[in-house]
Structure formats: C-alpha cells, structure tokens
C-alpha cells in the first residue's frame, strides 16, 4: 500500500469552497492576511454599504476554526458565508502531508 501510494499516478481532489466575507474597512487588511495563510485564491474585494466584501476560493480543510479566527480578528464585526464551489487537485506538497496523516507513513 505504501509503495502504491507513493508511486501511483493517482491524485487527491480536495473540495474548494466559495467564501464571502463582509467586514468593516478597518479590518479588511487583517482578514486578507489571515486568508492568505489558508491557501486562499482571492477573487474580488469590493465595497458594499461602506463595508468591504471579500470573495475567495479556499480549500475546505483550511476553514477549520475560521469562524473563531474571524471573530477574533474583527472583534465580532464581520460575517461570512461558505458554499461548495468545485474540486481541485491538491498540490503535491500537501498531498504528501495528507497521505502521511491518513496512513501513518
């Protein structure tokens, strides 16, 4: 199994979520910095009613604990919605980490 996992031609697909965050202007740079650490692909940063609206694609696995993180960064002054967007082939470095975490080798 170990050899097959390492030498096989398979890929791991990970679910990618579409996230929309509505935050006050003063928190937008902190929110964007946090998103960049979560392997996000920022799609758009717009203004709506005096607030910043950030839309991005992010792997589902990187959203664990995001609600708590966003509340902490913005002192509870932001909202976000998440919905499934598509599957994407996982980058090889993250693929190796995932295989090790699941199989133990």
Image (tube, rainbow, N blue to C red):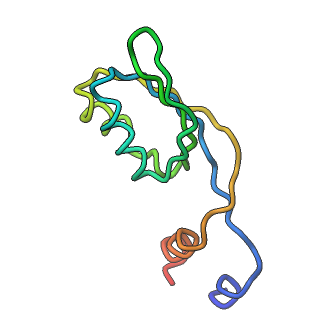
At 65% across and 85% down in the image, what residue appears? 6
Work out whether residue 55 or residue 92 is closer to the camera in this orientation and state it.
55
Q: Residue furthest bottom?
A: 3
**Relative to the observer, which residue lies in front, 104 or 9?**
9
Residue 73, placed above or below residue 89 = above
Q: Answer above or below: position of 40 versus 104.
A: above
Expressed as whole percent of the image width and height from the top left, the position of residue 26 reads 27, 25
Q: How many marks?
A: 0
Residue at the image point whose x is 70% and y is 88% from the top: 7
Side of 93 relative to 15 (left or right):
left
In the image, 101 versus 48, the foreground residue is 48
Q: Is residue 50 left or right of residue 87?
A: left
Give the percent coordinates (x, y) of residue 32.
Answer: 39, 40
Q: Residue at image x 55%, y 50%?
A: 59
Q: Residue at x 44, y 51 (%)?
A: 38
Expressed as whole percent of the image width and height from the top left, the position of residue 35 reads 42, 44
- Where, quadrant-wise, is the N terminus in this rendering? bottom right
Snapshot quadrant of residue 14: bottom right
Could you say where residue 52 lies in the image, as x and y percent from the top left? Answer: 42, 22
* Left/right of residue 9 with respect to residue 54 in the rendered view: right
The residue furthest right is 9
């Amino acid at each position: 199994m170990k050899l097959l996992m390492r030498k096989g031609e398979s890929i791991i697909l990970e679910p990618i979520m579409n996230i929309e965050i509505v935050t006050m202007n003063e928190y937008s740079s902190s929110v964007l910095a946090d998103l960049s650490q979560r392997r996000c692909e920022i799609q758009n940063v717009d203004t709506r009613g005096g607030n910043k609206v950030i839309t991005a694609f992010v792997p589902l696995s990187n959203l664990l604990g995001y609600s708590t993180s966003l509340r902490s960064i913005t002192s509870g002054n932001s909202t976000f919605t998440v919905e499934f967007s598509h599957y994407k082939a996982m980058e090889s470095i993250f693929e190796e980490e995932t295989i090790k975490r699941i199989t133990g080798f």
